[in-house]
Image: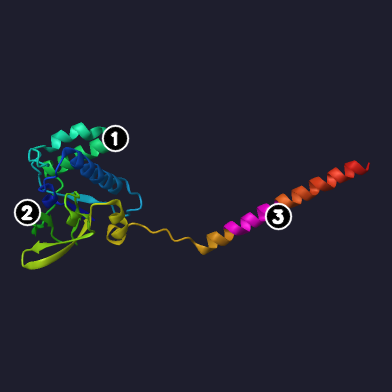
Amino acid sequence: MKITFNKAAYCVKLPSLEEAGNVYKNYIDVFFILKKEKRITEGIEFFGEMIDTQQWITSQGHTIYDLKKCWGKYGVDRQRMLLQMFSMMASGKSSPTPSKIVKLDDTKFQIPAEERTMLISLETARKYAEPFLEGVLEDQPLYRMLNISRADHIEVHRIPLGIRIYQPNPKHKRDFFRKRLEDCSDDIGKQRSTRTAEQSNTNR
């Protein structure tokens, strides 16, 4: 499954650096879960275009580099994840071919051509908090895309992500309870043997 970084979400300026820190922390957490999710059977590739890290992310003129002031909230692993995300976009290695152009709000960006589109979004606007987004794809004025901006969206999209759902084997359940009954029977038998021996010793 290929997941595209939602470039449009980077274009929304947040009101303060503190709020930007919280939004990016949540973003990193979601990215971290996707990278570490062991139930995803087929693996994930991330797809994206270069992001201008010098652009303002707040209306007060802060850039992505100013997030260092908030990095105490992130933890070392998540700090590395954030750097990895921007490195992937800047390197161009995350951009497979062929691709197609989608327009979301006023921003155009590339998405993989031959798969159902799934985005990972910064929650910089209320619309990006939804599990589905609509954009314009070439001659399709209403192009629906899957969206992940929160951890619970991963469960919403568990089927296209290929997440395994554990189905308990009824036989295993029967075997488990049979074993428990056998263990209990053994314990009861041992207790009875112990009581019998104690009574025998008392009667002597």
Indicate which disc, 1 or 3, sits on the residue closer to the N terminus. Answer: 1
Using the image, tell me which numbered label, if any, was put on residue 185. Answer: 3
Query: Callout 2: few (<14), some (14-19), or many (20+) C-alpha neighbours within 10 Å?
Result: some
Question: Counting residues from the N terminus, which is met first, the one under dot 2 or under dot 1?
Answer: 1
Pick the residue in front: 53 or 161: 53
Secondary structure at numbered mark 1: loop
Q: Which residue is mark 2?
A: 107
Q: Quadrant of the N terminus?
A: bottom left
Per the model, the C-alpha gap separating discs 2 and 1 is 31 Å
Question: Left or right of 202: which side holds 35?
Answer: left
Q: For mark 1, what is the residue?
A: 75
Residue type at mark 2: give it.
Thr
Picture coordinates of residue 173 (x, y %)? 54, 60
Q: Residue at x 19, y 37 (%)?
A: 83
Q: Is residue 188 above or below residue 144?
A: above
Q: CA distance from mark 3 to mark 2?
A: 69 Å
Q: Is residue 154 left or right of residue 195?
A: left
x and y percentages locating residue 131 in the rendered image: 24, 59
Amino acid of disc 1? Gly
Is 52 one of the magenta-colored residues? Answer: no
For the C terminus, which image quadrant? top right
- Establish if 82 lies above or below 155: above
Question: Which mark is first along the chain, 2 or 3?
Answer: 2
Q: Nearer the viewer, mark 3 or mark 2?
A: 2
Mark 1–mark 3 Cα distance, whole angstroms, equals: 51 Å
